[in-house]
Image: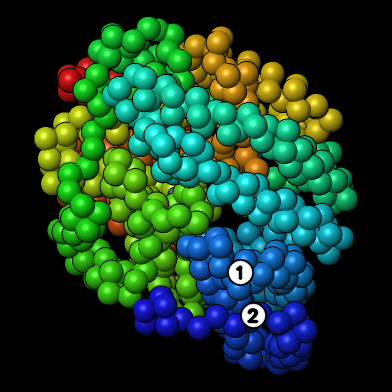
Amino acid sequence: MKFSEMKYERPDIEASKKYAGQIKQKFIDAKSFEAADKAFMEWDKFTLHIDTMMSLAYTRSSIDTTDEYYEKEVEYIDEFSPVFTDIQHSFVKLVVNSRFRPQLEEKYGSLMFKNAEIFLKAFSPEIIPETQETNKLETEYQKLIASAQIDFDGEKKTISQLFPYKQSPDDEIRRSAWSAEAGFYSEHGKELDEIYDKLVKLRDKKAKKLGYDNFVKLGYLQMNRNCYTAEDVDKFRKAVVKYIVPLADRLYREQAKRTGLEYPLTFADASLRFRDGNPKPQGTPEEILETGKKLYHELSDESAEFIDVMLDNELMDVLSKKGKAGGGYCTQLADYKVPFIFANFNGTADDVEVITHEAGHAFAYYIARNIVPSDNQSPTLEACEVHSMTMEFFGWHKSDEFFGKDAAKFRYSHLFGAITFIPYGTMVDHFQHLVYENPEMAPDQRHQVWRELLRVYMPWMKLDGSPFYGEGKGWQRQLHIYENPFYYIDYCFAQTAALEFWTVMQKSHEEAWQRYMRLVRKAGIQTFIELIDTAGLKSPFEGDALKEVAENAGEWLDSNGI
Ligand SMILES: [Zn+2]
């Protein structure tokens, strides 16, 4: 079914409660495993339907943030979703404590029960008011960013529309785009600080209501960390500083020489990889999509079928439009067993990333769409990011067509970006640890913390004389810090795994694809660490993985420099 034909109906609170109550009763009354299993499946279908309605509302509202109907629906869903979490919570509790649990575990695996127990620890009806409040603040942040109308080049530009100028090889244009954007953030600095301050305090309050010292523990539970701890993350952080930061610093020093710009680099100058400009995809957005289609047709039969379904059913809304929310994401419309991709094409290499990254998520969902129960379809988020970030590297297969004469520059920049991202992402996570461990910090102190972390993780950056960024406020641009606490490190673990896959690809594309599919097919029935093992990779928590990644990528970049 085409996206435009999918019917949205507001999920009613009372009706949902009533229906949930009926299924619960069936589960309680079940005399046999078969009867319990039947109720369990009915529950799965019910939650997927609600999830589909929520996805439709959010997606349609992000496609057109000026649409008043869906704006109201999103407001409603912000209120509805914690109530629904409560409804789910009570059913999950029932299942976890059921006498049929052993049979259910045997049929569906034990990981979903481990995850269910984590979910039970991360929620209690007591925290519904704070959750509703945080939802509202998150929407407020999103709206504020989407509302940006920045005067530039004689026009009003959104933040996404400004992005290509921020990479311009013309120093004056690039620097003024960076400062125009910094101007917007500075102008709204107080608001941004206030929203975040409220979020931190609300999250802290929720954690305390649930009996935790601070939000760190609850944040980990909310991220469903089922196979590593904060100590493991700390080990990873140290390995990043030891192996990745020095390589990234060397790459930026080389970049400064190549572009004739001064080291340490300003934020605006650090974004220019090559003097004659960053790699640009060739052709129109339609042609980029067409090349994407060819990529998936050549990778495998399953990926060919997948991309055809996406394109035939309007499941990719990728062109940039006024009023459209920023960023890109992939979501699922479970009632129809299809994923949906949202993005803002802007004529930079990011457009290709949408075709590979977001479509990597979508492809993994497509492969897992028939697995029951739905809890087993998707792994934890770092593993989901392995799906997408590895697919970005499989995209190299078509880099000559995506980028034409810029293909070699693209491959270099992509690998460069993959390496230099890891310190940044780790810093985003480290920052959040410090923020939530010290919830009473004043906004200015938070900026100070960010500034100090910049010196550790991004020593190539020149901080002095750079408004907004140099003042340690750059984190306010990072949506995840506001909306998805502790999510960001997942990208770093995933990037490490994706770089390990990249190493395999350099030797054998076929072998890399087979190992990738082994991981994708396991969907959500293994933990992240088990999945990494399934693919024959090293865990990012062993310092060795990062050491090898740094060596292999460093060597390739040295011999493929431009
Ligand atoms: Zn992703």
Residue 164 position by quadrant: top left
| Marks 2 and 1, how far apart at CA | 14 Å
**Which residue is at 71% across, 56% downward?**
135
Left or right: 179 with respect to 484? left
Residue 201 location (% of width, % of height) = 82, 41
**In the drawing, what numbered circle is on residue 432?**
none
Which residue is disc 2 drawn over? 10
- Residue 390 seen by the camera: no
- Residue 356 seen by the camera: yes
Q: Nearer the viewer, mark 2 or mark 1?
A: 1
Q: Is there a contact, CB below 8 Å, between mark 2 and mark 1?
A: no
Which residue is disc 1 drawn over? 68
- What is the quadrant of the C terminus in the image? top left
Is residue 106 depicted above or below 412 in this figure?
Answer: below
> Does mark 2 have its CB less than 8 Å from ligand 1?
no
Indicate the amino acid at tag 1: Glu
Residue 62 location (% of width, % of height) = 52, 60
Q: Secondary structure at mark 2?
A: loop
Residue 415 location (% of width, % of height) = 30, 31
**Which residue is at 64% across, 80% downward?**
10
